[in-house]
Image (cartoon, grey):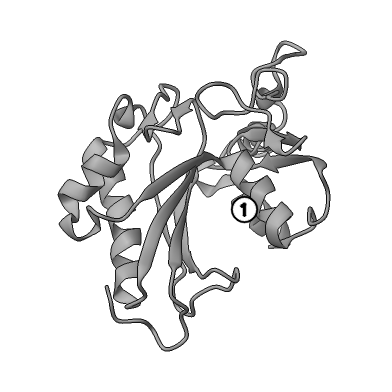
């Protein structure tokens, strides 16, 4: 890993987005530039086995290592509940196979070459907002809210120099809305990719949920 890609700068970090239906990753250098050819994406099943989920993480890391960039750290953006300081998943509604397991330790056993690379874990909504504050639409603001829409809905809030998180690193109860009561259910039942699929299946019962929200958009074009 000491040999650098010609287009990479020292100190590239592997950023992993662990979503509900796919894992994506890319190498980013200190200036925020993407290392060419480092992007990777693999499908994942949120109710899959531990071996399958860890194998997906490992494939992302192997791809990054193949770019011959010096990886100074690995950042994982993942939904909660999660102990972000210790890197231990507390989710039971999805990726239940990871519950109570140290992700870094598990991956280091699969890939001994990453054992000395530091890991950081951050809530996916906080990761989105942090990125926008660093290089995107949130630059220069000291009081800002970010909303993510994907498999679920996430909300992050930053003010007074800090994210409003709970003790584990997830957005505080006052900020998070996904499980707030709404109509005859919760917010995420109505505002999420899952909600869109359920609504669409009322008009097209044959549509399979595996196609996701993207599949609905593609079906509309045909």
Q: Quadrant of the C terminus?
A: bottom right
| Residue found 47% across the figure and 86% down from its top | 7
Q: Residues within 10 Å of mark 1 (few under 14, many from 20)?
A: few
Q: Nearer the viewer, residue 123 or 143?
A: 143
Up-down relation of residue 143 to residue 169 (above or below): below
Up-down relation of residue 8 to residue 97 (above or below): below
Find residue 202 and report its image quarter.
Answer: top right
Q: Is residue 88 left or right of residue 113?
A: right
Q: Secondary structure at mark 1?
A: helix
In the image, farthest residue toward the front:
161
Q: Is residue 58 left or right of residue 18?
A: left
Up-down relation of residue 167 to residue 128 (above or below): above
Q: Is residue 212 left or right of residue 91?
A: right
Q: Quadrant of the N terminus?
A: bottom left
| Residue found 68% across the figure and 41% down from its top | 149
Q: Position of residue 34 (x, y in %)?
A: 54, 73
Q: Is residue 60 left or right of residue 113?
A: right
Q: Position of residue 44 (x, y in %)?
A: 39, 47
| Residue found 58% across the figure and 22% down from its top | 166
Count every numbered label the image shows and give the total. Answer: 1
Q: Nearer the viewer, residue 134 or 192?
A: 134
Q: Is residue 84 visible?
A: yes
Q: Position of residue 179 (x, y in %)?
A: 64, 18
Q: Nearer the viewer, residue 209 or 49?
A: 49
Q: Is residue 52 visible?
A: no
Find residue 121 and report its image quarter.
Answer: top left
Q: Which residue is mark 1?
A: 214
Up-down relation of residue 26 to residue 133 (above or below): below
Q: Position of residue 45 (x, y in %)?
A: 38, 41
């Amino acid at each position: 890993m000491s040999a650098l890609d010609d287009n990479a700068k020292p100190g590239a970090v592997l950023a992993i987005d662990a979503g509900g239906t796919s894992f994506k990753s890319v190498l980013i250098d200190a200036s925020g530039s993407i290392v060419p050819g480092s992007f990777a994406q693999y499908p994942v099943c949120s109710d899959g086995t531990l071996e399958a989920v860890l194998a997906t993480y490992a494939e992302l890391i192997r791809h990054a290592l193949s770019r011959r960039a010096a990886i100074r750290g690995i950042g994982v953006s993942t939904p909660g509940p999660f102990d972000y300081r210790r890197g231990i998943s507390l989710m039971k509604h999805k990726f239940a196979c990871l519950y109570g397991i140290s992700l870094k330790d598990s991956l280091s056993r699969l890939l001994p070459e990453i054992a000395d690379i530091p890991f950081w874990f951050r809530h996916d909504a906080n990761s989105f907002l942090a990125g926008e504050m660093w290089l995107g639409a949130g630059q220069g603001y000291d009081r800002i809210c970010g909303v993510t829409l994907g498999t679920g809905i996430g909300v992050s809030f930053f003010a007074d120099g800090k994210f409003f998180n709970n003790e584990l690193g997830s957005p505080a109860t006052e900020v998070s809305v996904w499980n707030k009561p709404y109509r005859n259910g919760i917010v995420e039942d109505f505002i999420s990719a899952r909600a869109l699929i359920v609504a669409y299946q009322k008009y097209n019962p044959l549509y399979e949920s595996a196609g996701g929200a993207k599949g609905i958009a593609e079906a509309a074009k045909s």
